[in-house]
Amino acid sequence: MRLSRAFLPTLKETPAEAQIASHRLMLRAGLIRQTSAGIYAWLPLGQRVLRKVAEIVRQEQDRAGAQEILMPTIQSADLWKESGRYDDYGKEMLRIRDRGDREMLYGPTNEEMVTDIFKSYAKSYRDLPRNLYHIQWKFRDEIRPRFGVMRGREFLMKDAYSFDLDAASARESYRRMFRAYLRTFARMGLKAIPMQADTGPIGGDLSHEFIILAETGESVVYLHKDLLEFDVLSADPDGTGDPSPVVDFWTSRYAATDEKHDEAAWDAIPADSQVTARGIEVGHIFYFGTKYSGAMGLRVSGPDGTPVTPEMGSYGIGVSRLVAAIIEAGHDDDGIIWPDAVAPYPLAILNLKPGDAGTDNLAERLYAGMGGDAVLDDRPERAGAKFADADLIGYPWQAIIGPRGAANGIVELKRRATGERVELSLDDALARIRATT
């Protein structure tokens, strides 16, 4: 992307309504723009990050055996009345009527709809197990939307739904998704800690929240330090075998939000292993048995011909919320520090003297060497403005090209996360960047 042609509306001043780091930086870096209370447009760089986050989520869902579908945002109220949740959900649900005066709603979640879809086709135990997921926009009419996309009214969410023949199989599906979540967040450079949680309006008796640690987190969390030192990607490199060793490790160490905190259990942990911090919820998984399948008449023929009500679970990840959470976990006074896997572009090429034959040539060669997967700052701006924008937006690498270095074919390469600078040839600079992308 050439910045001379880009739509990148960065801001020098912080908007007054932005209270937390991610909201401030997403607005200032030109990632989003508010269109109404709690509702945001995603601008080009923000959309690139959102797509990268969604793709990692998608890959790990596929790896865990889930199959992607796409359900509509507008749902019939009849489905929610059938499950018994229509009147219970509260004012967060946006209720509407179509021109035929039929009661409809903008979906806040999809347990009812996916159960109805699956019921239409599943007839036998041979149709189980199945896990269906989609990545779709949701709407919840928060009474006080705040913190940008961290607590907005419209949000992009991955929700998955498992169907199993019995409780033991359903809990195994739960464990596979538990592991998939750990891998998903780890691939984004995040340490997400699963913690036992209330099931809320979803229902059921087994639930975990996945919490990342950040100073601006909404919840106080308590955990054993072993959980911070465990590398799930090294311990479980392919993510397709028995999930038990990984899940058993995580569930055998203490981890709780303040709502679930047990002082007696906490006091039993050695003081040097206790970690207290603040955290942000980025995922939530539930096993709720036959709450929806039973209410909505989902039955399949069992191995002996007896009708069986499948056991279900649901698994949510706030994809758009994750973008803000990643920023909360990685930023400094100058701007965002993106993990390599989700950065809008891996590299910003800062041509300090556009129009100079030497700097133009070297910048264009580096841009071509990246296959266009870089930002080329070819604007007629002063160097300080280019440095400030690159730090604000947080590209993992900056290639600084001035006349002196260009005369010798040298690129000054800066790593955003550490501030480390090194002078390299063009080929060596490309090799260094490619090693991290």
Image: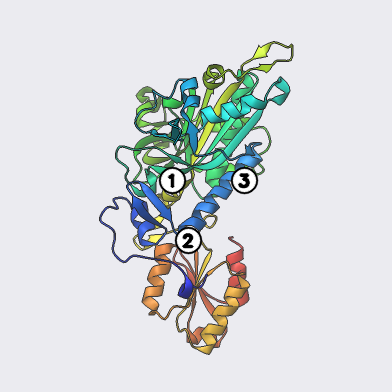
User: In the picture provided, is 206 more to the left or to the right than 380?
Assistant: right
Of circles 3 and 2, the one toward us is 2
Q: CA distance from mark 2 to mark 1?
A: 17 Å
Residue situated furthest front in the rendering? 100
Crowd band around label 3 with a 10 angstrom C-alpha radius: few (<14), some (14–19), many (20+):
few
**Residue annotated with mark 3:** 59
As shown in the figure, which amino acid type bears the numbered disc 2?
Pro
Crowd band around label 2 with a 10 angstrom C-alpha radius: few (<14), some (14–19), many (20+):
some
Would you say the residues marked 3 and 1 are in contact, meaning their CB atoms lie under 8 Å apart? no
As shown in the figure, which amino acid type bears the numbered disc 3?
Gln
Q: CA distance from mark 3 to mark 2?
A: 23 Å
Secondary structure found at label 3: helix
As shown in the figure, which amino acid type bears the numbered disc 1?
Arg
- The correct choice, above or below, for 123 with respect to 350 in the image is above
- The correct choice, above or below, for 89 with respect to 330 in the image is above
Crowd band around label 1 with a 10 angstrom C-alpha radius: few (<14), some (14–19), many (20+):
many
275 or 189, which lies in front? 189
**Residue annotated with mark 1:** 321
Residue 167 percent location from the top left of the image: 60, 19
424 or 368, which lies in front? 368
Query: At 53% from the left edge and 50% from the top edge, which residue is drawn?
Result: 53
Secondary structure found at label 1: helix
**Residue annotated with mark 2:** 44
Query: At 38% from the left edge and 61% from the top edge, which residue is drawn?
Result: 335
Q: Which mark is residue 50?
A: none
- The correct choice, above or below, for 190 with respect to 95 in the image is below
- Quadrant location, the C terminus: bottom right
Residue 154 percent location from the top left of the image: 41, 44
Residue 247 at least partly seen = yes
Q: CA distance from mark 3 to mark 1?
A: 18 Å
Which corner quadrant of the image does residue 236 belong to? top right
Lower sequence index among marks 3 and 2: 2
